[in-house]
Every structure is written in C-alpha cells, then in structure tokens.
Image: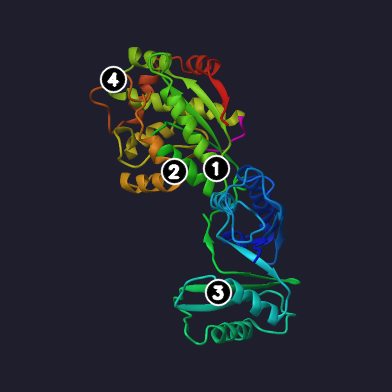
C-alpha cells in the first residue's frame, strides 16, 4: 500500500483571518526548505488544500535514502518525519494513501491499512471538506467501520474514546486520503512571519532555549556571542556554533557575530566600582548587540534571563541593564526555573552541548560581591568614567561575522 502523500494540519494559522494566506504561503515555503535540507528529492510538490497542506511524495527513492515505509513512495520516511517535526507551524501530519472518492475504494484501502496493525479496539474518523461527496462524515464512519468490523469477524471492538488503532479518512476537493497514524508537530507559527531578532547567545542552557522560543513565534533569529579571547580558549565559540547548528534544524539562520569583549572588560574593571561591574558588562553587551541588530534589520534583542537565577537577573538589575537599550529586549524564560529550562533543553537537543564546560566572559573578572539591587543613578554615575562611544566603536571594529553551516 503506497503512502504517497503527507497531510499536514496547522493550528494558529487558521485564526489569522485576512492574513491567513501569508502564513500558509510561508509555511509551505518552510516545509519545502526543510524537506530539501533533510531529505532531498523525496517530494514532488507541496500545495495548499482545504484546511491544510498536502505533500506529494516522490515515487522514486530519494538520494542517500536509508529508511522505508512499507510500499511507500518515499524511501526515507524517518528523515521526512524528522524534517516535519522540526518545522514550526505544523500541528500534526500523517503519511497517507490517496484513494478515489468512492465508498468501496475507501473500505478496501482502510482494511488494507488497518489489517497490518495490532490492536484490540479501533475506530474510523472522517473529515469531509468536500460537501458534494454524497456520504456525510458520520455515514462514511459507519460504512467503513462496519465493513472492517465484519472483515475482523466481529472479534475486535469499536471504541470511539480511546481506540488502539484509528483509521483517518479525509475527503478533500476531488480526492480522498487515508492514514492510520498522526504525528504531533511543534505548533507555533512559521519562522519568518514574526520579524527578526538578535539573540545574545552565551553557550549555556538558557540562551539557546530563548532563541527556540522566539523561533516558535515565527521570529527569524541572528546571534551575538561575547567572548574573552585571547584570555580564554575558543571553546565558547565552538560550543555556540554547535548550538546554532541544532537550532538551524528548527529554521534558525547561521548568522553569528563573534564579539571580543576582553579589552572592554578590562576598561570597566579599572575605572568603575567592583560591585557594579557585571551590570556594566551587560549594559555594554546590550548596546553592542543592538548596533549589530540594527545592521541586520532586527527589531528586538533576546536574552536567556530567568528572574532571580543569578545576581544580574533581579528586577532591579534588569531595570538597570534595560535602560541602555532602545530596542525591546525579550526574555522568554523569565518565569521558568532551572529544571523547567533543562527539560526544554533535553527536548530540543541542546542539553548535551550546553552542559559542556566553557569560559563565560561574564564570569571572567567577576567581583567577589556583585550588586544585586543596583540603583540606576549609581550605574549611570559609574559609566561617566568610561568613553562609551569609543569602547563600542573599538569593539565593533574587531567583531567578526561568521556563517555557521
């Protein structure tokens, strides 16, 4: 039985009203890009259908194919599944068999598919967007379900609430499709529909998850990483590059700005009070990242701050840091605790990379007693000892733009 199509459904996009076509078009574009990246030559077309998106699979084996579905047109269904499960905007999807819009044909195909499964209870569920088809959804359920029940010699039972096996029938336009399994997608919005943002990427657990959360809301992200070379190794840059490669599977770009921060840190250390040092570091990071963001036409900055997690992330200190920004600063992890953050890291595949040791430029030259309740007037007074514009200009001149592949 040839599973020659994939039916893709979305959630939030259906609520977009007059903008719905834009979101659907972007999702189609992203699906094509993901399939071409994960499993080239596996599909013939990706098109809009009533209530969803249809992928027509290539009947010939895809290049470098290593997996198969029973009789499937695409010989690498595992890669296809992986590609779609990394695509924001998809709520669920199913490998499906195309069938003539005929009740007997539907009965035969549903039986062929369901007879390959092991189960004690089953049900048939039909969605009918083509109202010209003479059977209602309930009538299709009854006709096909009754046929399967008789073929099973009444030895298996029907369960509508929690069946072991489900047969899904979709009556769409002039076609019908049948599947027996749905795969959950990530949901969210298609990447590229929510503007651009610059992620301040440290290499720890938090910032890659903050980037992932923005990707889920349709935002295209770029990355800014501050390092203290040559006083530290290249480990942090290499680690951030690996994290970006993971995020690229979800639609992130590979644009990374590698920003040398050591000389600026030394200037702050020599000319400002020790307790305010970390806050001043972060204010300069905000300014530098913002300059790069504007260069990339980004409309916001993103950090992995979680309220109260470290000294610089109290409300008072966040206020003092934010004052240096003119762009919005998004903190999608602000209400999460460390265990919740770790769970997401495991889920998206960044955990094993983030747990590797690296030199964080913010911990270098860390004062013994950092301020946890900074007063903005004191911070501004301390900055008067620094030539802010010169330090930013010199740091940007030494910043390197990398493309991670």
Task: Determine the residue positioned at 36% across, 48% down.
Answer: 343
Front label number (4 vs 3): 3
Q: CA distance from mark 1 to mark 3?
A: 36 Å
Question: Is residue 307 found left or right of 139 in the rendered image?
Answer: left
What residue is pinned by disc 4?
274
- Whether residue 146 is visible here, answered yes or no, is yes
Q: Are marks 2 and 1 in contact (CB under 8 Å)?
A: yes
| Image coords of residue 254 (percent x, y) | 57, 33
Mark-to-mark CA distance, 2 and 1: 10 Å
The residue at the point 65 percent across, 78 percent down is: 108
* Left/right of residue 301 with respect to residue 282 in the rendered view: right
Identify residue for label 3: 115
Work out whether residue 283 or residue 331 is closer to the camera in this orientation and state it: 331
Alpha carbon distance from label 4 to label 1: 41 Å
> Does the rendering let one see residue 51?
no
Cα–Cα gap, marks 2 and 3: 36 Å
Q: What is the x, y in percent for residue 67?
A: 57, 51
**Which disc number belongs to residue 249?**
1
The answer to which of marks 1 and 3 sits earlier in the sequence is 3
Q: CA distance from mark 2 to mark 4?
A: 37 Å
Of labels 2 and 3, earlier in sequence is: 3
Mark with earlier residue (4, 1): 1
Q: Which residues are magenta?
A: 296-300
Main SS, magenta region, reads loop
Q: Which residue is mark 2?
A: 349
């Amino acid at each position: 039985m040839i599973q020659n199509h994939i039916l893709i459904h979305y959630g939030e996009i259906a609520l977009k009203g007059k903008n719905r076509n834009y979101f659907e078009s972007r999702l189609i574009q992203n699906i094509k890009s993901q399939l071409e990246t994960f499993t080239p030559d596996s599909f013939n077309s990706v098109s809009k259908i009533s209530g969803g998106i249809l992928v027509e699979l290539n009947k010939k084996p895809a290049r470098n194919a290593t997996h198969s579905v029973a009789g499937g047109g695409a010989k690498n269904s595992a890669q296809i599944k992986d590609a779609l499960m990394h695509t924001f905007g998809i709520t669920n999807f199913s490998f499906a068999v195309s069938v003539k819009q005929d009740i007997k044909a539907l009965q035969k195909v549903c039986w062929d598919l369901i007879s390959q499964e092991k189960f004690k209870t089953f049900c048939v569920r039909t969605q009918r967007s083509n109202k010209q088809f003479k059977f209602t959804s309930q009538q299709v359920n009854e006709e096909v379900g009754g046929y399967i029940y008789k073929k099973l010699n009444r030895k298996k039972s029907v369960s509508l609430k929690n069946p072991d096996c489900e047969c899904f029938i979709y009556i769409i336009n002039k076609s019908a499709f049948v599947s027996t399994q749905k795969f959950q997608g990530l949901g969210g919005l298609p990447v590229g529909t929510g503007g651009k943002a610059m992620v301040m990427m440290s290499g720890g657990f938090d910032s890659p998850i903050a980037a992932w959360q923005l990707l889920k809301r349709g935002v295209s992200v770029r990355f800014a990483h501050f390092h203290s070379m040559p006083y530290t190794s290249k480990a942090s840059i290499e680690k951030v590059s690996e994290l970006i490669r993971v995020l690229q599977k979800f639609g992130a770009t590979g644009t990374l700005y590698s920003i040398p921060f050591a000389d600026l840190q030394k200037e702050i250390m020599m000319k400002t009070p020790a307790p305010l040092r970390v806050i001043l570091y972060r204010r300069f990071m905000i300014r530098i990242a913002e300059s790069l963001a504007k260069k990339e036409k980004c409309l916001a900055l993103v950090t992995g701050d979680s309220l109260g997690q470290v000294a610089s992330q109290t409300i008072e200190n966040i206020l003092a840091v934010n004052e240096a920004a003119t762009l919005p600063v998004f903190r999608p992890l602000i209400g999460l605790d460390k265990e919740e953050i770790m769970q997401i890291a495991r889920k998206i595949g960044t955990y094993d990379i983030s747990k590797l040791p690296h030199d964080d430029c913010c911990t270098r030259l860390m004062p013994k007693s950092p301020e946890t309740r900074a007063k903005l007037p004191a911070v501004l007074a301390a900055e008067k000892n620094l030539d802010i514009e010169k330090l930013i200009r010199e740091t940007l001149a030494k910043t390197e733009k990398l493309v991670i592949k």
